[in-house]
Amino acid sequence: DTEVTQTPKHLVMGMTNKKSLKCEQHMGHRAMYWYKQKAKKPPELMFVYSYEKLSINESVPSRFSPECPNSSLLNLHLHALQPEDSALYLCASSQPHWDSGNTIYFGEGSWLTVV
Amino acid sequence: AQKITQTQPGMFVQEKEAVTLDCTYDTSDQSYGLFWYKQPSSGEMIFLIYQGSYDEQNATEGRYSLNFQKARKSANLVISASQLGDSAMYFCAMRPNTGNQFYFGTGTSLTVIP
């Protein structure tokens, strides 16, 4: 079983809704990530938090708002999304500094549909 | 700039046969890690195997082995004795020793035929 837990597994929201995706990891990692993935494509990096601070924002539209309340939790707040934002959203965690074996571990993903 | 190339968009293999999924990479970093992930249709990205750039031996994990050729900058995944449950997307990824970015290839869709 994965030690990175994402909720909800599936989410359908209207374009005027506000919703949040949640992620929790129990691996003691200090870097957490949000990726967006379309069908048959590789994951696209959205945000990286390192030691609870936002370290990378890949020019993501402001309708996506990340939050890292503590070292174990990562949220993605969604507001005024577009249908093209429908995708699989993957949360992941790793150690922030590279050394041998610093793998990134993923959650099961949240399938988002914007109607 | 870092770049990962997977040239096989789709592959088929007979059950119980071995299959090799190709991955080449381009980096100017001296130290880096190479990873393979499996993604079934359920969506979860499952870590399979890791190879460090300074590891002299090829990594193995059960039926998975990584054929690492540093001079050619290739890190091919070999799956032995394929099973129906191996049908999935497979992504090669690299993490350089600077920063915490992971770079993914475009993926290979593997179908195991009974």
Image (cartoon, coloured by chain):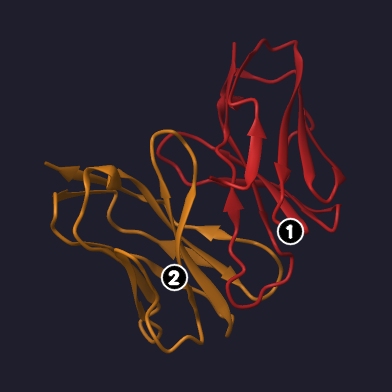
Chain colours: A red, B orange
Chain for numbered disc 2: B
What's the amino acid at mark 2? Answer: Tyr
Residue drawn at the location 50% of the way across and 82% of the way down = B53
Query: Given the image, what chain letter belongs to the residue carrying mark 1?
Result: A
Instruction: Please report the residue visible at 62 percent of the width from the left and 68 percent of the height from the top.
Output: A102
Residue A57 is situated, as x and y percent measured from the top left of the image, at 76, 48
In this rendering, does residue B76 appear at all?
yes
Residue A10 image-quadrant placement: top right
- Residue B2 appears left or right of B8: right
What residue is shown at x 69% (from left), y 20% (from top)?
A81
Please tell me whether mark 2 sits on a helix, a strand or a loop.
strand
Residue placed at 47% from the left, 65% from the top?
A: B35
Residue B1 visible, this orientation = no
Which of the labelled discs sits on residue A29, or is there none? 1
Residue designated by label 2:
B25
Spatial CA distance of label 1 from label 2 is 26 Å
